[in-house]
Amino acid sequence: MQKLQRSRARKPGVVQLPEGPARARILAVDDDERNLLAISEVLATTGDVICAQSGEEALRFLLREDFAVILLDVLMPGLDGYETAALIRQREQSKHTPIIFLTAINKEDAHMLRGYDAGAVDYVFKPFDPTMLRSKVAVFVELHEKTIEIQRKAGIEQGLLAQALQAQKEKLQAERALRSAEERQDAILSSLPVCFHARTAEPPFATRFVTKGVERLTGFSPADLTSDPGFGLKRVHPDDLARLEQALLAAKTAGSYTCEFRWKCANGEYRIFLDQGVMSNGADGRESEILGTLLDVTDQRGLEDQLLQSQRLDAIGKLTGGLAHDFNNLLAAILSGLGLLERRATLDGQARQVLDLMRRSAKQGADLVTRMLAFSRRQTLKPEAVRLAVLGDSMNGLVAPVLGALIRFDWQIDETVWPVHVDAGQLELALMNLVFNARDAMPSGGTITVQAHNRSLRTSSADVPAGDYVVVTVKDTGSGIAPDILAKVIEPFFTTKPVGKGTGLGLSTVYGFMRQSGGALRIESVVDRGTSMQLWLPRSVAEPGNPTAETDVGYMRLNADARRPSIILIDDSNALRQLTAESLRQHGFDVTCAAGGPEALALIERAPNDFDVIVTDFAMPLVSGVDVIRFARTLRSDWPAVIITGYADASQIADRPADVPLLGKPFHDKDLLETIFLAIANVEPKAIKTA
């Protein structure tokens, strides 16, 4: 009874052993509890024995656990050993588990073969020898434990391999991220006009290290600079070398330095570099060295120079505009006075010669003011569609007499060139200016060539916006212009000619005219080989019209009409107003004078029918000439009017009524008379339509 209870206590599970490492599990299946107890006792040291009293119970254990070996009784109620073995072999998890059949009666070969067919690996016959049973089971337990150990080690190795692969993957990802970061950094650095360098702290300040960006900046590779200790200083502009060496030497005491210098690149061009750095005191026995950056500031300095020049021209232009108004008033008074004197007085030959000299001097003063307005871009232009080929005959006629026999003038512009949008008269003056400069550069003779070609810019440059242009080139074979002078030649009043041979306004006038016309002036020159002046002229969207003969409107009307129109003359310059009024009276006009806008408004409002034509100065205190005309036309919409001006901004002049002609000071009497009758002709169609 005690044995049975012991067997029943062990029925559901494992034989109790001291705790230790996990041992192999052995499944013993027998319907006799005594056999199970004996097996448990014999195999207690071999493994943990799990007891089952039927095939069904054994199958339930196999669903939950794995076993090193199965001891299976052949004859059992319900499922016998053969049927249980067959079911065990059908299960994937247990089909390779060794099965040892336990039998007491079936020792015939047929029964043993059936057992082997069912999946048995061995037989143990009852009553069994404990030593034999233990040895047979021990073989399979040891095999199972070795298999488990191999699997465990394989799992460990697999885990280590997975960890190694993960570490390798993370390393590759880190290396890839590092390369990507380096590539981004290189791309960013290569897009900037800067490189990093390290050089020795002692002369000749040899380059020890420089980034690859130096090749894009200078055209030289890093190896070119590091292989030759004196390479860097050899290519510094001679005028900047001493200043750079002084700055580098001073870095030893100051700890840092900043220096800007010109450096000769691989293409022979000098670029401007800003070199900044700090002194690195050597540690661990290393030599001290200078660490720094090299920044290409050539374009920045160029833009700064352009801005400075633009500001200078703007300041001069504002000054010129104010002077032009007053100066032209004086010149107009002088020329009007000379005209009155010539008509009223009887002059002998010497007096007439003096008068002609005075008139010529006044005209030269007027030309000077016009040129000053041109370079300051404040002259009044009348752009139109111009075909350059038709200018050939007139240019040949203008320049041939002054070039001399030693200079050949070659005009090479044909009809294939686009028409341009420009003031034709001012363009001829600009071309003559360039031709005369080319002549002066060739005292021993040579050839002046004028060419033109069409050019389209898809992107804007520093001085020319995108668009279609005609590039007119005036090229000579003269002495050329030195590089240090080339940037100054367009500055007003700068000249290399002897005193009395030039005003210094020639190229600055051309430059101002081109900028005001929406183009550009570009200059290329090589000393002793010649100079090329390029005029970039905007293409005209319209075709040039056919020239028509101009009609002398003023004198036709003056000769045809018996009655002279009455005029209200408005000018804040007393001398010019009086002289102009006297000149008009001599031509038969009835003239009423007003000293300014307010006085003119009062006269017009009081007696609007007393005056046929308004002749007014443009710029006057309080009330301008345009304001006078607008007020007058509220009383009479078809009132003829003329504006005369010494100088006015183009935008202000454009604000005047479209049928009001403009006459610049100083003017000839003939020009004033024609302009008055042109004003009358402009409003006559309107008056007829109204009538």
Image (cartoon, rainbow, N blue to C red):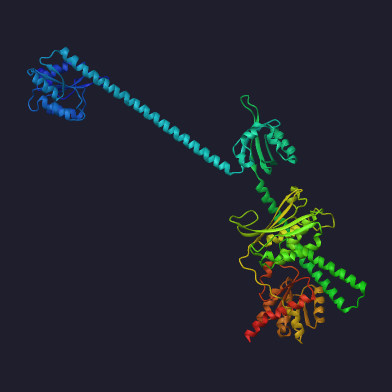
Which image quadrant is residue 3 in?
Answer: top left
**Number of residue marks:** 0
Q: Position of residue 119 (x, y in %)?
A: 15, 24
> Looking at the image, is 222 positioned above or below residue 398?
above
272 or 480: nearer the viewer? 480
Residue plotted at (61% across, 43% down): 193
Q: Position of residue 433 (x, y in %)?
A: 76, 60
Choose top left, top right, bottom left or bottom right for residue 151.
Answer: top left
Give the quadrant of the N terminus. Answer: top left
Q: Is residue 29 visible?
A: no
* Residue 458 relative to residue 682: left or right: left
Relative to 673, is 124 on the left or the right?
Answer: left
Q: Quadrant of residue 515?
A: bottom right
Q: Is residue 282 visible?
A: yes
Question: Residue 44: image x %, image y %?
Answer: 19, 17
Left or right of 27, for residue 359: right
Residue toward you, 540 or 251:
540
| Viewer-nearest residue: 290 or 384 | 384
Relative to 446, residue 64 above or below:
above
